[in-house]
């Protein structure tokens, strides 16, 4: 194994002029053992890593994450890598999968990737277990986190890993996957990026979030207040220049602060006991050009520029991310000639979509990751 110490990394950061997020190097900062609860049963060797990356599209930062190898000896050429971008777990440090382990929704998928002979590099995202608050649904930042951990994985396990890799994720991770799929080749040119799988991924959020304000009606979509609070928490910490607190009600500020220190499951339980609508969070509407531009920069999913196959999965029964958003995304990508395949599920809910689509996702991976 090859480890780059934190002191060496700090010197390299200075020498390379890491003042701009786009220019900063992806460097392994440290590694340590994972807590036993965070290690899948199908993992052979595993490690928790801390690595340099970006925390918003314009600010450098650090992230932690998990790297898992399959059991046994690597195949000729090494194990191909799956970069896994997790769904919403919250933004508090204790929510990081490299600390708490993957939840019952996503752990079975990690197990299947490992059992199929793929190494898994799973980012926690910058701000979850590292300084600051995660820039929730800031697509370019999450994409960099998902790409850069693959580079960190090669710093440690480069002798047993293939350069071939894909990226995949559920929900929040699906949103990150779209962005990572567009940036993967240019951000990690030394590797051999092959494709992406976005499952139940929200799109067109930049058209929805600016409509938030005290007059917005209560929405039937489950979890919307939870998602809104996490988004506000990230903006409050990472983009203080927009003064998001000025637009929030006292209740909105109180719940935003709770979201910063509480994992999503606990936050959801609290909201069930304290019913809250999106409108309750706001004292003034966000409908102005400042916030429209901000949400476009953070959330507008690309519709072109993908240089490798993209697989999209969504279910008609998804009540967390309405499927018409994905239909619109597919139509726009197809207009731009994107190589995209689509699997539409019927009876599965948002969470169930991940495992329901695994057989086809594994087949996709086998196809695009095969040696050429």
Image (cartoon, helix red, strand yellow):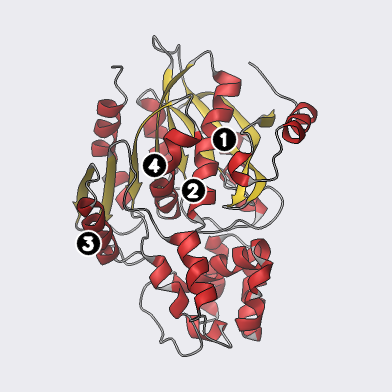
Q: Which residue is mark 2?
A: 103
SS of the residue under disc 4 = helix
Which labelled disc corresponds to residue 316? 3
Report how far apart the C-alphas of labels 2 and 3 lie in the structure.
23 Å
Q: Which residue is mark 4?
A: 181
In this view, the residue in front, 178 or 271, is: 178
Image marks 4 and 3: residues in contact by CB distance under 8 Å: no
Of badges 2 and 1, nearer the viewer stands 1
User: Which residue appears at 24% of the width and 51% of the height?
Assistant: 336
Q: Is residue 278 left or right of residue 356?
A: right
Image marks 4 and 1: residues in contact by CB distance under 8 Å: no
Which labelled disc corresponds to residue 66? 1
Report how far apart the C-alphas of labels 2 and 4 lie in the structure.
24 Å
Residue 124: x percent and y percent?
57, 45
Of badges 4 and 3, nearer the viewer stands 4
For the residue carrying disc 3, how many other residues have a C-alpha within 10 Å: few (<14), some (14-19), or many (20+)?
Answer: some
Of badges 4 and 1, nearer the viewer stands 4
Image marks 2 and 3: residues in contact by CB distance under 8 Å: no
Q: Is residue 184 left or right of residue 124?
A: left
Image marks 2 and 1: residues in contact by CB distance under 8 Å: no
Image marks 3 and 1: residues in contact by CB distance under 8 Å: no
Number of numbered callouts drawn: 4
**Residue 365 quadrant:** top left
Residue 284: x percent and y percent?
56, 87
């Amino acid at each position: 194994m090859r480890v780059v110490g934190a002191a060496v990394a700090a010197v390299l950061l200075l020498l390379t002029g890491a003042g701009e997020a786009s220019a900063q190097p992806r460097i392994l900062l440290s590694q340590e053992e994972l807590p036993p609860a965070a290690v899948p049963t199908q993992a052979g060797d595993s490690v928790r890593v801390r690595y340099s990356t970006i925390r918003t599209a314009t600010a450098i930062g650090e992230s932690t994450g998990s790297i898992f190898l399959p059991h046994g000896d690597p195949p000729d050429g090494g194990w191909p890598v799956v970069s896994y971008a997790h769904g919403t777990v919250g933004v508090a440090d204790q929510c990081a999968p490299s600390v708490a382990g993957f939840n019952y929704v996503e752990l079975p998928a990690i197990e299947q990737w490992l059992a199929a002979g793929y190494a898994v590099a799973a980012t926690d995202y910058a701000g979850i277990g590292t300084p600051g608050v995660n820039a929730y649904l800031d697509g370019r930042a999450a994409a960099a986190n998902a790409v850069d951990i693959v580079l960190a994985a090669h710093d440690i396990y480069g002798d047993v890993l293939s350069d071939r890799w894909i990226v995949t994720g559920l929900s929040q991770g699906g949103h990150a996957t779209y962005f990572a799929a567009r940036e993967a080749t240019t951000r990690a040119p030394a590797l051999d990026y092959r494709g992406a799988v976005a499952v139940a991924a929200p799109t067109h959020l930049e058209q929805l979030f600016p409509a938030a304000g005290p007059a917005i009606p209560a929405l039937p979509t489950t979890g919307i207040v939870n998602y809104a609070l996490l988004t506000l928490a990230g903006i409050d910490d990472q983009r203080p220049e927009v003064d998001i607190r000025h637009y929030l009600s006292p209740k909105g500020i109180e719940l935003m602060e709770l979201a910063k220190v509480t994992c999503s499951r606990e936050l959801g339980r609290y909201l069930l006991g304290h019913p809250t609508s999106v409108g309750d969070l706001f004292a003034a509407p966000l409908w102005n050009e400042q916030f429209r531009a901000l949400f476009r920069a953070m959330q507008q999913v690309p519709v072109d520029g993908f240089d490798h196959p993209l697989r999209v999965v969504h279910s008609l029964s998804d009540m967390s991310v309405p499927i018409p958003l994905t239909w619109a995304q597919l139509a726009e990508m197809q207009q731009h000639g994107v190589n995209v395949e689509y699997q539409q599920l019927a009876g599965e809910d948002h969470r169930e979509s991940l495992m329901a689509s695994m057989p086809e996702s594994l087949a996709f991976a086998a196809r695009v990751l095969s040696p050429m």
